[in-house]
Image: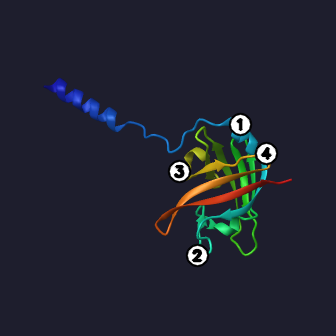
Amino acid sequence: MKKIIALFTFIIVVTSCKTPAPAAATNVDRKSQVAIKGNWTITSVTYAGSDMFKITSFDLADSKCFVGSTWKFISNNDSGEMALTQPNCTSFASPIKWYVNKDGQFVLKFLAEGIKAKKMQQGYILKVADQTVESFKLIDNINIGGKMTNIVYQFNKSN
């Protein structure tokens, strides 16, 4: 009887310690990632109902404040930086960690000073679309007024 109880206890412990599945695949799409390398500017942020709803992007600022923001993506170490530069908007700059996975998802983390990316629990998963040498889109799917809506961030290559 003790052996049976010990076996059940072992099974419960092993099952309860199972590692949760990751939120996004971590297999990197190197071709997409290398194509994003460099300096970029968000030239537009669009979504249905933009004239009626104000959206806070990335829990930072109004989505329209991201127009004109500058982004630097370094593909060999999945790092970079971004800065909001719109007048009359919250000033913000941050180092970032990012990658594009095999599912076409762009995984992004804004890094707080002194905290490593692997310790950051909060991040964002967007879809990469219409990728060319000079432009690409990141698409976020959010709930606006009870309806799922795409917010499209248009990136264009900076000089």
- How far is disc 4 from disc 1 in space, using C-alphas? 12 Å
Q: Which residue is mark 4?
A: 133
Q: Nearer the viewer, residue 62 or 103?
A: 103
* Residue at x 22%, y 28% (from the top left corner): 6
Q: Position of residue 77 (x, y in %)?
A: 70, 40
Q: Mark 2 vs mark 1: give the one in front.
A: 2
Q: Nearer the viewer, residue 67 or 59?
A: 67
Q: Position of residue 33 (x, y in %)?
A: 70, 41
* Residue at x 76%, y 73% (from the top left corner): 87
Of the numbered discs 4 and 1, the one sitting upstream in the chain is 1
Of the numbered discs 3 and 4, the one sitting upstream in the chain is 3
Q: Please state which amino acid type lies under the numbered disc 4.
A: Val
- How far is disc 3 from disc 1 in space, using C-alphas? 27 Å
Q: Which residue is mark 1?
A: 31
Q: Please state which amino acid type lies under the numbered disc 3.
A: Gln
Q: Mark 3 vs mark 4: give the one in front.
A: 4
- How far is disc 2 from disc 4 in space, using C-alphas? 34 Å
Q: Are marks 2 and 3 in contact (CB under 8 Å)?
A: no
Judging from the image, what secondary structure is the residue with disc 3 in?
A: loop
* Residue at x 65%, y 43% (from the top left corner): 99
Q: Report whether 12 appears left or right of 24.
A: left
Q: Which residue is mark 2?
A: 52
Q: Report whether 11 appears left or right of 46.
A: left
Judging from the image, what secondary structure is the residue with disc 1 in?
A: helix
Disc 3: CA contacts within 10 A as few (<14), some (14-19) or many (>=20) = few
Q: Which residue is mark 3?
A: 121
Is residue 6 shown above or below 122? above
Q: Are marks 3 and 4 in contact (CB under 8 Å)?
A: no
Judging from the image, what secondary structure is the residue with disc 4 in?
A: loop
